[in-house]
Image (cartoon, rainbow, N blue to C red):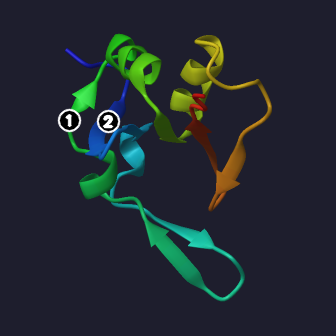
């Protein structure tokens, strides 16, 4: 049972393995973006609806070519797993946010 409060969806785009993960309570929220009163909806179509465990998130991040992470808990997990540098994340509407791109070559 997923008790960690993450939701995740994996998108396959050509050769990319795109992992989108957020803290579960963010789904359906509208976050303010910019100063013109715009918002962005945290969509289950992008981030998913199925709750997943820490282990599932780490498994997916290990294989991701692109990752989109939103929320305090998932960013803390990514830091603990060595996927992002502590303190390096930005914010989206006041919520911690990071994107990871794997560079191969």
- What is the x, y in percent for residue 80? 62, 12
Residue at which label 1 appears: 50
Judging depth in this view, the residue of 81 and 91 nearest the camera is 81
- In the picture, the disc for residue 8 is 2
Mark 1 is surrounded, within 10 Å at the Cα level, by few (under 14), some (14 to 19) or many (20 or more) other residues, namely few
Q: Residue furthest right?
A: 87
Task: State the image quarter where residue 77 is shown.
Answer: top right
Residue drawn at the location 59% of the way across and 71% of the way down: 32
Residue drawn at the location 62% of the way across and 42% of the way down: 98
Q: Secondary structure at mark 2?
A: strand
Task: State the image quarter where residue 72 is shown.
Answer: top right
- What is the x, y in percent for residue 34? 69, 77
- In the picture, the disc for residue 68 is none
Residue drawn at the location 62% of the way across and 62% of the way down: 93
* Labels 2 and 1 touching (C-beta < 8 A): yes
Counting residues from the start of the chain, the first of labels 2 and 1 encountered is: 2
Q: Is residue 40 above or below residue 64?
A: below
């Amino acid at each position: 049972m997923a008790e960690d409060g993450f939701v995740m969806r994996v998108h396959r785009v050509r050769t990319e393995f795109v992992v989108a993960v957020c803290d579960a309570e963010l789904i359906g929220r509208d976050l303010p973006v910019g100063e013109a009163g715009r918002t962005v909806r945290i969509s289950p179509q992008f981030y998913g609806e199925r709750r997943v465990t820490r282990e599932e998130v780490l498994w997916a991040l290990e294989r991701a070519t692109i990752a989109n992470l939103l929320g305090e808990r998932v960013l803390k997990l990514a830091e603990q797993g060595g996927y992002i540098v502590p303190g390096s994340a930005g914010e989206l509407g006041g919520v911690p946010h990071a994107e990871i791109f794997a560079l191969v070559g």
